Image (cartoon, rainbow, N blue to C red):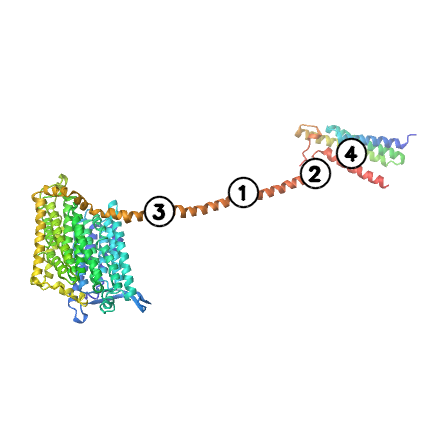
Amino acid sequence: MMHTEYYIFLSSALFTIGVIGVLTRRNVLIILMSIELILNAVNINLVALSQYFKSVDGQVFAIFVITDAAAEAAVGLGLIIALFRNKETVNADEIDLLKW
Amino acid sequence: MHFLDNIWMIPFLPLAGAAIQLFFGRRSSNRAVSVVSVGLPGLSFVWALGCFAQFLALPPSYNHLFLRPLYTWLPAGAFHLSNGTVGNLTVGVGMQLDPLSCVMMLVVTGVGFLIHVYSTGYMAHEGGYYRFFGYLNLFMFSMLVLVLADNYLMMFVGWEGVGLCSYLLIGFYFLRKSASDAGKKAFIVNRIGDAGFLMGVMLMAVTIGAVDFQSVTAVARSGQFPVGSGVITAICLLLFVGATGKSAQIPLYVWLPDAMEGPTPVSALIHAATMVTAGVYMVARSNALFALSPKALAIVAGIGAATAIWAASIGLVQNDIKRVLAYSTVSQLGYMFLACGVGAFGAGVFHLMTHAFFKALLFLGSGSVIHAMSGEQDMRKMGALSRKIPVTCWTMVIATAAIAGLPPFAGFFSKDEILWQSFAGPYGHTLLWTVGWLTAGLTAFYMARLIFMTFWGESHVSHEAEHHLHESPRPMTIPLVTLAVLSAIGGFVGIPKSLGGGEWFGNFLEPVFEGNAVVPMHEYGRGMEYFLMGLSVVTAFVGIGIAYRMYVQQPALSDRVSSAAGGFHRLLLHKYYVDEIYDALFVNRVKNLGSGLAAFDLGVVDGGVNLVGWVTRMSAELSRLWDSWVIDGLVNVLGFVVRVLSWPARILQTGMVQNYAWFITAGVLVFMVYYFVRL
């Protein structure tokens, strides 16, 4: 029988990898991909725990997250393209317009 | 028409003329100027004649004195006199007519009018015509104020006024440096005399307590001061200092020869007939004071005699026709003071009158000669003019006869009266007579020399001048003829008793001088008087004869004499170097003092002002430095501190979103750790 703990371990590992990717990677596309990874990790967590609690709420929530992730990816890519048009770079270190 | 009551019209008419000319004359035509400026003095002369006639007709209660006060000038003020009492000094403006001022008034207005007429001809082609007549009228006004005043201060106003007009008229051609220098010299030397005069009047005010003629004469004759009083002597000598300045005696005569720079009518009016006689008039007016002081009289007589012979000696060798006449004037003024100094005030005034006639004639005649010679004044370039300008020539001959003292011309009577009084008069002395007699001989010589060099002998006239030789126009010749007549018959008013005359002039003036303590004359008989008279006439002829020999018969003789006495001749030609001596002793010292003071003003005073300005600029500079370094520095430090203190907060803002994500993650971890530890 699959213990639920294994799914939670997997989701937290994926979450951690995703966070580390967001925090450390220079390429903004990789950062977007890491954000997707975070969202997928959360999905796994939701589905696993919906099976544990014999409730379908988790799965419904997971559908919402997937939809949201898709919209967010589209918007994010649009942002990156707009940014690239102005700054000619996809290096996160070079995008520091918010600095004083 | 009561002339006497309105006697103030006499000076007022020329004043009106002066005002009209000096304010409006610039745009007037010469004709308009002439009519106003000659007509008004003419009217003044008519008025003077009217006053004279009415004066003679005054009832005896007036006692030969007519007073016409006009208004109070300085009202009564109490002050301490020198002898401790409290006096009350009131000075008014008023006019006084007594025999002395009658004579002066008639001479000034009469001769003045003739000279005004002459000037219309002489100045016809000169620029500044209106200015000339304006100044001339102003002079007439001042001189009339002087002679008609009833107190010393008003006389001083006129005194100063004639000095001013003298300056203005001497420097009439002011664009010529020599003329403006001469004007300055005249005014400054006059001023020295004026200082003495004013001190005398001030001393009079604190001693006698009054400055009007009547009070002073009354106090002097009252016996309040003893004869020989030191204070009175001081007053007389100070007044005489003023007279030496105004009437060109030693030591203040040096301005008169230079004054010949002015136009010739000016020399005739001011420096022959009227202004220079103001000193004599003043001394005669103060006869009561002088009678109290034999010492002062002696000094007056001595200086008069010394000046007479000094100036005559200089006049012997001068070559400029006007210079000769200038020194002659100084010399004749010396005669007048000699007369006053020996107590014969009447004789001095008599000579003043006759001298006005013949000296004015001589000057006007010389002006006529200069006019004919197109401006030439050097006698060595004249000669043989008697045929060319006969009227000028013969009128000047008459004047020369008068001044040389040849009978029956005017100068004979007046000059001989002076010589007789200086010999036998109350304060006379043989030495004074000798000097006067020698001077008479010198006078005859140099005047004859002038006539012979100008009108006879060989002609040394230059070719260009020869073409223009012509007799002067009527406005010039008529006054010459009039004055010649006066020079011829003017003496007959004063024929002495010894020649069978009535001594009208002396008797007329007697009321002015009587009342002084009578000092008896020396005891000489008529014989002595005739002898001296004859001696002076013979001396005059001798002088004329020598001049005739030296300048007509043997012209080379004059050169031989001047080269034989070379050193002495040069000394006389250079006027005894008096001007140079004065320059070295006084003038240059004063000028150096002036330069020193100017340097002080420039260096110290201006330097001080500049220093204050520099200090102000320096303090402004310091302010600027303080402002830019200290104040701005503080502000900059403040900014620097803020920057330093905000550094930690600044570095947090990197603008990189990933860093902000780190901080979020870190915060979440902190919270997670906190809650795990809590639970």
Residue holding disc 1: B625
Contact between marks 1 and 3 (CB within 8 A): the answer is no
Could you say whether the residue bearing mark 2 is in a helix, strand or loop? helix
Which of labels 3 and 4 is toward the front? 3
Which of labels 3 and 2 is toward the front? 3
Give amino acid for label 2.
Pro
Quadrant of the rendered image containing residue B467: top left
Real-space Cα separation, disc 4 to disc 2, in angstroms: 38 Å
Give amino acid for label 1.
Leu
CA neighbours of label 4 inside 10 A, class few (<14), some (14 to 19), many (20+): few
Could you say whether the residue bearing mark 1 is in a helix, strand or loop? helix
Which residue, as the protein is rendered here, is positioned at the far bottom?
Answer: B61
Residue holding disc 3: B596
Real-space Cα separation, disc 3 to disc 4, in angstroms: 107 Å
Real-space Cα separation, disc 3 to disc 2, in angstroms: 77 Å
Chain holding disc 4? A
Real-space Cα separation, disc 1 to disc 3, in angstroms: 41 Å
Give amino acid for label 3.
Gly
Could you say whether the residue bearing mark 3 is in a helix, strand or loop? helix
Contact between marks 1 and 2 (CB within 8 A): the answer is no
Give amino acid for label 4.
Asp
Q: Earlier in the sequence, mark 3 or mark 2?
A: 3
Chain holding disc 1? B
CA neighbours of label 1 inside 10 A, class few (<14), some (14 to 19), many (20+): few
Residue holding disc 2: B648
Real-space Cα separation, disc 4 to disc 1, in angstroms: 68 Å
Estimate the x, y position of residue B19 in percent, counting from the top left: 26, 56
Estimate the x, y position of residue A90 in percent, counting from the top left: 70, 28
Q: Quadrant of the C terminus of chain B?
A: top right
